[in-house]
Image (spheres, rainbow, N blue to C red):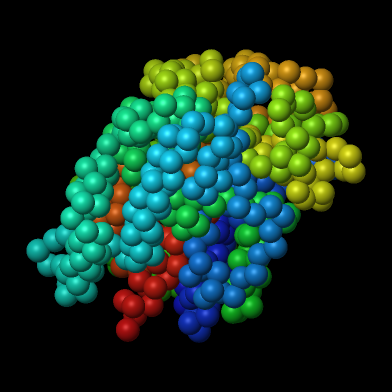
């Protein structure tokens, strides 16, 4: 049996849903097939123990693009908006950051941070313009549109003014460690900024490109952080609702076995159950390696292209810890209402770099860095009355752990993480009713991401903008007629922004004209 569609989207992650909704809005008959039983990919909400729910992977909203919300008419309910970041101190001398203000530092550092934030936000705004466009091709046969986009990029950079343009060009390939050490005396401020630059990457503060990754994180919502009512799954459910409004059919629990290739172009997909669906257009929200190496098959693409795809760096480094709590843990110097904020454990930039050192050699960190939230403080639906949930991203926990991620190695790492938390929350262990630790290997298995990397490939200058995911595939179209990418492995990258899905849909609709 074969059903015919104008387009088939593989994967109901948020980018796949954005792409599907936009194609449906343009009048296309669209099918979305999702391997898991729930839409959302890495942006889902689920119960991890009875009565306690969490955002299972992505847990805070940084980057959802205004253009996506506007064009799809999204109205998201927010439990906590413009959350402050609290950099924890074991002695209770915490640092608090919100927008361009920082408390708990000297007047000199506070002034330096305002200037730093103003400059970085301006650069991030420039970035964001191009995160929402198809990147130009840098080739002899580049189109007039490609050349105009490239020229526009040059003009936009020049409009910064000579001083700021020179500063952007100086910073773009730098490491964040040198920048924060030059500007700030406060170790906790240097540590908090360093954490933001490396979270979710296989990079440390001394690694090149970490100013780039810091700017990427600021792009979209200008660094403001929010928590949706119902967790991150609420964002995905809203996108699915929008897609269905435009006539999109969404089928869950339906893993794709292969993309059907006929005469050098796509003809549809075949599922694991043997069902086939026909379409002249297939858009993959899976990562580039899974798409080409598994779903398309190397025999259907040129060897050189396969080699470039094979060498995409996509080794995940982040784990996720969920705790069901019978009460909030005690944090010295933190008032009850402040638990609605975001907390980070990164005492200084050297601590972050030392945490990364272990991952270089395939080991999990013995002193990890953490991004922590207590979503039940702002959203009572996440836990039973009077109880709470803690959600934490933990680095560094490499997907390719030496010896592999076994039950013993996960248990050992959980003890390490709890020990780190105990330094800042002395009674945390007595508050815990249940726990769940997910490593990047779990993300790879459960969310079907090669290496468990939530960007589907490292964000670095050689895997960014004009060269993302690789040369010859930077404009969403793959070297198989009718095949496109729309996920985090395509431009501009990961984060719950919807930019890749929107850009891919626009590129597809433009190509059809």
Viewer-side residue, 144 vs 80: 80
Task: Answer above or below: position of 437 versus 268.
Answer: above
Q: Residue at x 58, y 50 (%)?
A: 225
Residue at horizontal 35%, vertical 28%? 181
| Residue at the extreme right | 385
Looking at this view, is 347 or 285 the one in front?
347
Left of 156 or right of it: where is 87? right
Above or below — where is 31 with respect to 194?
Answer: below
Residue 23 horizontal/vertical position (percent):
48, 76
Q: Is residue 421 above or below residue 392?
A: above
Rendered residue at 67%/39% (across/down): 373
Left or right: 259 in relation to 172? right
Quarter of the figure with the N terminus: bottom right
Image quadrant holding the C terminus, namely bottom left
Foreground residue, 476 or 8? 476
Kindly give the residue lying farthest to the front in the view shown: 107
The image position of residue 36, as x and y in percent, is: 63, 51
Q: Is residue 390 visible?
A: yes
Query: Which residue lies at the image location 67% right of the left edge and 46% below the top edge?
Result: 55
Q: Report the front residue among 92 and 17.
A: 92
């Amino acid at each position: 049996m074969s059903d015919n569609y104008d387009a088939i989207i593989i994967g109901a992650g948020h980018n796949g849903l954005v792409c599907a909704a936009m194609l449906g809005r343009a009048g296309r008959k669209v099918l979305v097939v999702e391997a898991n039983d729930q839409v959302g990919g890495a942006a889902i909400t689920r119960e991890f123990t009875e009565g306690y729910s969490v955002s299972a992977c992505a847990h805070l909203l940084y980057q959802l693009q205004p253009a996506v919300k506007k064009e799809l008419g999204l109205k998201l309910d927010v439990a906590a908006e413009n959350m402050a970041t609290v950099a924890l101190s074991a002695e209770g001398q915490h640092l608090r950051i919100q927008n361009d203000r920082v408390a708990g530092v000297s007047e000199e550092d506070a002034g330096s941070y305002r200037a730093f934030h103003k400059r970085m936000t301006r650069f991030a705004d420039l970035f964001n313009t191009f995160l929402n466009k198809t990147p130009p091709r840098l080739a002899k046969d580049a189109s007039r549109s490609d050349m105009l986009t490239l020229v526009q990029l040059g003009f936009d950079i020049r409009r910064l003014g000579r001083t700021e343009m020179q500063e952007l060009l100086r910073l773009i390939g730098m490491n964040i460690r040198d920048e924060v050490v030059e500007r700030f005396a406060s170790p906790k401020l240097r540590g908090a900024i360093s954490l933001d630059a490396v979270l979710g990457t296989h990079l440390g503060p001394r690694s090149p490109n970490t100013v780039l990754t810091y700017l990427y994180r600021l792009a979209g919502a200008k660094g403001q952080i929010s928590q949706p009512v119902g967790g991150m799954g609420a964002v995905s459910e809203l996108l699915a609702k929008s897609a269905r409004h435009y006539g999109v059919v969404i089928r869950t629990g339906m893993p794709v076995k292969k993309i059907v290739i006929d005469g050098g172009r796509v003809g549809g997909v075949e599922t694991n159950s043997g069902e086939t669906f026909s379409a002249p257009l297939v858009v993959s929200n899976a990562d580039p390696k899974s798409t080409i190496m598994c779903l398309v098959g190397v025999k259907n693409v040129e060897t050189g292209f396969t080699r470039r795809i094979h060498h995409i760096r996509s080794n995940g480094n982040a784990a996720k810890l969920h705790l069901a709590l019978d009460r909030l843990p005690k944090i010295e110097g933190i008032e009850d209402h402040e638990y609605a904020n975001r907390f980070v454990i990164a005492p200084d930039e050297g601590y972050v770099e030392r945490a990364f050192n272990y991952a270089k050699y395939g080991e999990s960190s013995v002193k990890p860095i953490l991004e922590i939230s207590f979503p039940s403080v702002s959203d009572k639906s996440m836990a039973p009355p009077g109880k709470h949930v803690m959600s934490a991203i933990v680095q560094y926990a490499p997907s390719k752990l030496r010896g592999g991620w076994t039950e013993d190695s996960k248990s050992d790492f959980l003890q390490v993480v709890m020990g780190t938390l105990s330094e800042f929350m002395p009674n945390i262990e007595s508050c815990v009713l249940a726990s769940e630790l997910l490593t990047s290997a779990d993300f790879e298995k459960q969310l079907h991401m090669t290496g468990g990397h939530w960007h589907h490939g490292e964000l670095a200058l050689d895997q960014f903008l004009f060269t993302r995911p690789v040369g010859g595939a930077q404009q969403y179209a793959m070297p198989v007629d009718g095949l496109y990418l729309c996920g985090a492995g395509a431009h501009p990258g990961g984060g719950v922004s919807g930019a890749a899905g929107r850009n891919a849909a626009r590129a597809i609709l433009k190509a059809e004209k």
